[in-house]
Image (cartoon, rainbow, N blue to C red):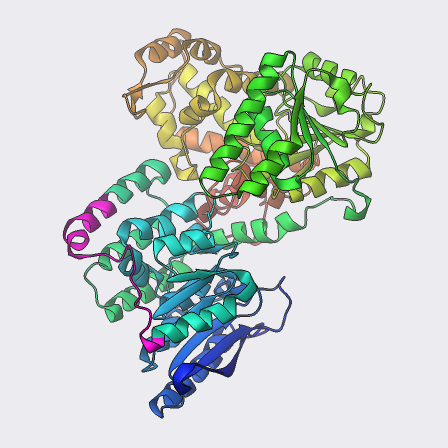
Amino acid sequence: MSADEVVTHSFVRDIPLTGGKVLALVTLDNGRDHTRPNTLGPVTLLELGRVYDELTARAARGEIHAVATTGKPFILAAGADLSKVSDIPSQAAAKKLAQLGHFVLGKQADFGVPSFVFINGLALGGGVEIGLNADYRTVDASVPAFALPEVFLGLIPGWGGAYLLPNLIGIENALKVVIENPLKQNRMLKAKDVLELGIADAMFSSINFLEDSIRWADQVVSGTIKVKRPNEPGKLERLAKWDIAIGIARKSLESKIGTVPKSPYKALELLAGAKRATKAEGFAAEDEALAELIAGDQFQASIYAFNLVQKRAKRPAGAPDKKIARPVTKVGVIGAGLMASQFALLFLRRLQVPVVITDIDQARVDKGLDYIRGEIATLLSKGRIVRDEANRLNALLTGTTNRADFADCDWVIEAVFEELGVKQEVFGDIENYVSPEAVLATNTSSLSVEQIGAKLKNPERLVGFHFFNPVAVMPLIEVVKTPATNDETLSTAMVTAAKLKKNAVITRDTPGFVVNRILAKVLGEAMHAVDTGTSFETVDAAVKPFGLPMTPFVLLELVGLKVGAHVLDTHHSAFPDRFFDSRSLHELADLGRIYEKDGKGNIKGVDKAALKIVASHSKGNEKPQTAAELQVRIEDGLADEVKRMLDDGVVSAAEDIDLCLVLGAGYPFHMGGLTPYLDRSGASQRVFGGTFHTPPIAGVV
């Protein structure tokens, strides 16, 4: 594992404190710039362990009176190097790595003098656990990302996080940090969150962070400051709240992600056990759990997905040179509805340029402006932005019914009704006002981008820019290239997506692009099954092995039954031999529901009226399918569709399809994407006599 390790070295210097005392400051630094975070491989840990041993000896001799650990500028540590972790050859070796982390980081409790960690920047996974193993922690107010993301990757916090965190900040807070946040698109904490949770004991400005942290540590050592932690669990929490919180979290996991993923439930077990276990027992339990998960198939699949998101997404296939991208100094948004307003807010926040919205009348424009300003006010009230930024964003926002106000826009995006003629009209009109070089972007989810631009004078500046809902949260944009789209336009779209902090995948102009085409295949098969007499429950059972975040029918209700019907109609029109024309979906859309729900929105069962609709279309001579039969049918249909997409050059490689599904459809990391699953299930071999990956990628079937 240490082969080619980028070693993070431990540099020590003595800092004088008041009263003749001395603080030994350990700085972690891998010698690279900020683009390569400190990581904690075996050589790194062994060196840090030796340094900590030397400091323990010095403390025993009375030479030092405190030890603090910090990182190179802007970075504490990003945890273990996952590219190395994925190469661990056995469960026994995995356990050694877990034990090594505990052995080294745990030395901070045995210095014989107070231990501190100054969190000066990025801290993820093992980087967070460096701090948890110390007595006290400070945090830089500008820290952009602080998290225990292990569950997101099919692991658990294995160097003390699962035991130490709940005993520091309480079980409910620990559940959010260890399980809930990773499963919410790997949500990160900011410095303020770290302080409020009680993970950090003090927060200081970046300007004098190190000096202020040393001064604060001096006061702790001298007894001037007594540290009180707001969320440290007491007797009442341990007697009652702890077990209740674990039970609620388990039920929530089962309802949201099912029971196939291992790491969230393993983390839940460790957090539950942290209530009564000694530190040694807690650490030993982490060792066993981490070793088991590292050696399992779900982690190997997760690493494939992780590499897609961390590496392939940052080097998009087919992207032109960034240098030819045109500057975007003003954005125009056609439409003022919910989606358009979300676009406007995102462009405002990320690009910090003027944004103008328009609609067919002033009332609609004013409603859109009120929504955006309300969202800015919410961000301010939650401390996500400061007053000056809120004022600046509001000043950059304008609305109009006169499209001539778009004349100086470099980028215009539409979010109007999903109808070809409407989109052609708005772009045809706006072209009369903007420069020939201004990029025109359409957010269509299923229409032909080329046809949308068929009447343009300059179709080469049109590009598809398909967001996913909710716009602020979902990290994917499908950038759609038509035969006419030139490289300058495509480059501008890719650079703009990156500035919006989104991951972009370039696709060919084809119905549904990537995500909706795959979802349409699943939804179409699900509706065809119930239309031909298969029960809703059987369909749910058939798709359960795919590990999808929700069943097809829950997804249909989420996106809207009318939208779902439109998407299926579009694909049936394009590929009538492979996508079904559901006889009942339009009637279900008119009904407005599939499920009957209670007052809290929980599903009670399939609505009786919905059952009546599908029953009216089912013919007596059609045989219902079993769950096993339908599972194979869906698997083979997807394998066929993906193969066609690759043969037609919709994207560059199978990895791009998996990347789109992970980022745009919530496809779980522990499955490793769709194409590895199709290889493992045998669908690829059944359909085209081969596999999408050689050798097949390990994972769950």
Vertically, is 675 above or below 3? above
Vertically, is 489 above or below 91? above
Q: What residue do we see at 59% from left, 36% from top?
A: 391
Give the x, y percent position of residue 197.
35, 53
- Hey, which residue is sitting farthest bottom in the picture? 61
Compare residues 96 and 339 and report the one nearer the observer. 339
Q: Is residue 52 visible?
A: no
Numbered-mark total: 0
Q: What residue do we see at 30% from left, 26% from top?
A: 602
Q: Is residue 574 visible?
A: yes
Compare residues 261 and 164 and report the one nearer the observer. 164
Residue 472 occupies which quadrant of the picture? top right
Q: What residue do we see at 27% from left, 60% from top?
A: 167
Is 159 on the left-hand or right-hand side of 499? left
Q: Check if residue 237 falls in the magenta segment.
A: yes
Compare residues 553 and 596 and report the one nearer the observer. 596
Residue range highlighted in magenta: 221-247
Give the x, y percent position of residue 548.
43, 37
Q: Check if residue 688 falls in the magenta segment.
A: no
Is 475 on the left-hand or right-hand side of 605? right
Give the x, y percent position of residue 169.
30, 56
Compare residues 457 and 561 and report the one nearer the observer. 457
Assign the C terminus to one quadrant of the image.
Answer: top left
